[in-house]
Image (cartoon, grey):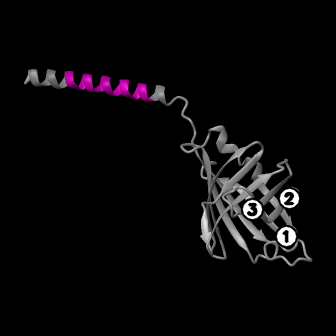
Amino acid sequence: MKKKQKSYGFLMIILMTLLSVGIASAQDNNQQPQAPCSQPEAAQFDFWLGEWELTWPGGQAGTPADQQGKGSNKIEKLLGSCVVQENFSTGDGSFIGKSWSVYNARTKQWQQTWVDNSGGYLLFTGSYENGKMELRTAAVERAGKTFVSRMVFENINENTLDWNWQRSDDGGETWQDVWNIRYTRKKQS
């Protein structure tokens, strides 16, 4: 009986030693854990954060040619600052959309999903380079032609930026403007 007690005691000492070494090792490895989405690229869309007043020329996005189009957009970070959420609305509320953008560290690209109240669903990928954010759709075939669409965020300043929706039917060699929106940051009261 004493031999079993000694063996059991010895096994307990070994087990406790291994356990304490494992805990100490885990603590050493976790002293400075990297927060999800903490890489610098995950902040490339931060210029877009905030509340914005939007304007665009008449004749675009269903706006009568003799009227300036108006809308608003609220952009915020969610889910541990990993997701950029967009909340878009035209001035009269007839067109409402949302998007979610995430930086994919594995592919080194931004990915965005867009949905709206007209049943629209679009997927984009792209990147931020030379002071511009550009996101593109995959090629789509319509009426025998292949189109690629893109949005370009440019002329980015603290309180203004330009957003341009463009389409190409020649594989991206040339682009035609479809919708040009001027963003102006709302004044904080």
Total residue callouts: 3
Residue 75 in percent (x, y) is at 73, 57
Report the predominant secondary structure element of the magenta stretch.
Answer: helix
In this rendering, position of residue 161 left or right of residue 107: right
Image quadrant in which the N terminus is located: top left
Picture residue at 67% right of the left edge, 65% below the top: 98
Residue where numbered disc 2 is placed = 186
Label 1, on which residue? 70
Indicate which label's residue lies in the foreground, 1 or 3. Answer: 3
Mark in front: 2 vs 1: 1
Q: Disc 1 and disc 3: Cα gap in Å?
A: 19 Å
Place residue 70 in its image quadrant: bottom right
How many other residues sit within 10 Å of disc 1, few (<14), some (14-19) or many (≥20)? some
Q: Residues within 10 Å of mark 3 (few under 14, many from 20)?
A: some
Residue at the disc numbered 3: 166
Magenta residues (range): 10-26
- List x then y, in percent, for residue 131: 78, 44
Residue 11 belongs to magenta span: yes
Tag 3: residue type?
A: Gln
